[in-house]
Image (tube, rainbow, N blue to C red):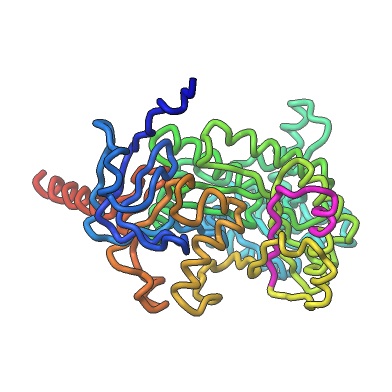
């Protein structure tokens, strides 16, 4: 018996109708309605043709002639670094030791109520030839004797501290019978951040991204220590309410660390996100490659190990030679049969066409501009709104390795959308980057509604005045 003849038509959980829906699907660029079921797009087209998808449990949302687009993806941002901005002593990678000490002195003087002075970002090369740990303890002790100072290197595998911190570290390690004192152990002894304050900042930043129409954030270039705190904040937010963007984390490495260690950390981060489903994921190694730091062999071993475990790689080529090394490493990954891992080369340097032709798998790599940790504004890199939209949807979904799930409004893809009052394709670039989204939708559910929030704020204001 052909049982499939009696299969029931899947019903929609929600249908968004009466809108101008730009799908980013060249075969069917515009629609007036989209039906969603089980977090995915069930149908795209005209509302009148969706009667068979409607049940007594289907919600109908009138878009009131607004413009809907695929959910915007920030594939170039640093939301974690933004969350912690102004909460620590930021060390420029190019500062020498004297410059660090000078600026640290000013920072301590301006923040005399801190319980811990925490800094991040120094280039570990400033330590070359200075093997005596005591010398760093003394140097930092000249700045502050009573309050711990912890400075974390850019690679996150090394830190220096003053005598006040050293005393706490040694006493605690002796009390706990710790044989090896690691950077991770040291950082966990000192809590320089207020967790409730961090969680509040995560929520505030989420509101900012909602206002810009972002439904997915891809995080780049933040230290593992910040990542863990940020991830814990997301866990708390998930238990209390709604996470307003999908968050894709990446493990940042800028030194040739042991491949097994990298894989262990990535696996640990990936596992810890399972309980929040597809909303928060860690499945990418973020490499910042300088040819003076990495050999081709060290890079290859990292790439092969990480891809063997099924992780993606997003690699910044920080100089021309490093960019060529990444091309060679990625080509080796493909030649070894790793077809499913997403490989992204981010660089402002380009290699010659002749060299590219040597790599038969070059068309399987995604290319983009280098990561700017200070500013993720696309306006520097695009010349039209259409190009900006492509980089926020189709191209961004390729960068994060989710082109089969995000980037366009098509049946079977995740139901992530952003809504504006006007047609953004008719704006100039300057106006486009100043626009405010009316609504953002994740997995078919509205997570941000500017009009509803404005009404709620007005009600709260009026209520407080009556009191």
Question: Which of the 4 image quadrants contains residue 168?
Answer: top right
What is the x, y in percent for residue 302?
Answer: 82, 50
331 in the magenta segment: yes
Q: Which residues are magenta?
A: 330-347
The residue lying at 42 percent from left, 45 percent from top is 41
The residue lying at 47 percent from left, 56 percent from top is 408
Residue 192 in sight in this render: yes
Is the residue 275 above or below the residue 211 in the image? above
Query: Which residue is situated farthest in the left direction here?
Result: 466
What is the x, y in percent for residue 321?
Answer: 83, 72
Residue nearest the viewer, comparing 278 with 356 = 356
Q: Quadrant of the image for the C terminus? A: top left
124 in the magenta segment: no
In this rendering, position of residue 115 left or right of residue 48: right
Is the residue 229 above or below the residue 64 in the image? above
Query: Which residue is situated farthest in the front direction here?
Result: 1
The residue lying at 80 percent from left, 54 percent from top is 334
Question: Which of the 4 image quadrants contains residue 272?
Answer: top right
């Amino acid at each position: 018996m052909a049982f499939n003849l009696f299969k029931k038509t899947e019903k929609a959980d929600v249908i968004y109708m009466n809108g101008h829906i730009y799908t980013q699907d060249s075969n069917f660029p515009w629609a007036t309605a989209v039906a969603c079921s089980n977090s995915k797009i069930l149908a795209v087209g005209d509302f009148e043709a969706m009667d068979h998808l409607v049940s007594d449990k289907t919600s109908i949302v009138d878009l009131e002639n607004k413009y809907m687009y695929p959910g915007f993806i920030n594939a170039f941002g640093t939301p974690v670094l933004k969350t912690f901005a102004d909460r620590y002593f930021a060390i420029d990678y190019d500062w020498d030791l004297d410059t660090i000490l000078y600026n640290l002195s000013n920072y301590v003087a301006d923040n005399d109520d801190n319980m811990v002075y925490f800094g991040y970002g120094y280039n570990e090369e400033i330590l070359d030839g200075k093997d005596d740990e005591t010398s760093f303890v003394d140097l930092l002790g000249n700045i502050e004797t009573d309050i711990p100072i912890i400075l974390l290197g850019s690679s996150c595998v090394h830190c220096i501290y003053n005598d006040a911190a050293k005393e706490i570290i040694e006493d605690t390690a002796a009390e706990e019978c710790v044989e090896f004192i690691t950077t991770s152990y040291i950082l966990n002894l000192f809590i320089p951040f207020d967790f409730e304050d961090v969680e509040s900042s995560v929520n505030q930043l989420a509101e900012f991204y909602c206002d810009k129409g972002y439904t997915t954030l891809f995080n780049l270039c933040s230290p593992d220590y910040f990542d863990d705190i940020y991830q814990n904040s997301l866990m708390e937010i998930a238990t209390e309410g709604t996470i307003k963007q999908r968050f894709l984390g990446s493990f940042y490495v800028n030194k040739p660390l042991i491949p097994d260690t990298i894989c262990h950390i990535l696996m640990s981060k990936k596992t810890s996100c399972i309980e929040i489903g597809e909303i928060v994921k860690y499945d990418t190694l973020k490499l910042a490659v300088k040819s003076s730091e990495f050999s081709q062999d060290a890079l290859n071993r990292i790439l092969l190990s990480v891809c063997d475990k099924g992780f993606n790689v997003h690699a910044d080529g920080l100089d021309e030679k490093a960019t060529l090394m990444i091309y060679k490493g990625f080509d080796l990954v493909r030649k070894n049969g790793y077809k499913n891992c997403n490989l992204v080369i981010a660089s402002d340097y380009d290699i010659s066409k002749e060299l590219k032709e040597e790599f038969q798998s070059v068309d399987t790599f995604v290319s983009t501009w280098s990561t700017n940790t200070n500013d993720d504004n696309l306006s520097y890199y695009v010349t039209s709104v259409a190009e900006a939209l492509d980089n926020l949807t189709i191209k961004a979904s390729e960068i994060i390795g989710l082109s089969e799930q995000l980037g366009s409004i098509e049946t079977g893809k995740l139901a992530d959308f952003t809504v504006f009052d006007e047609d953004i394709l008719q704006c100039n670039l300057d106006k486009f980057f100043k626009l405010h989204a009316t609504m953002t939708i994740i997995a078919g559910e509205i997570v941000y509604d500017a009009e509803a929030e404005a009404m709620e704020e007005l009600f709260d204001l009026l209520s407080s005045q009556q009191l």
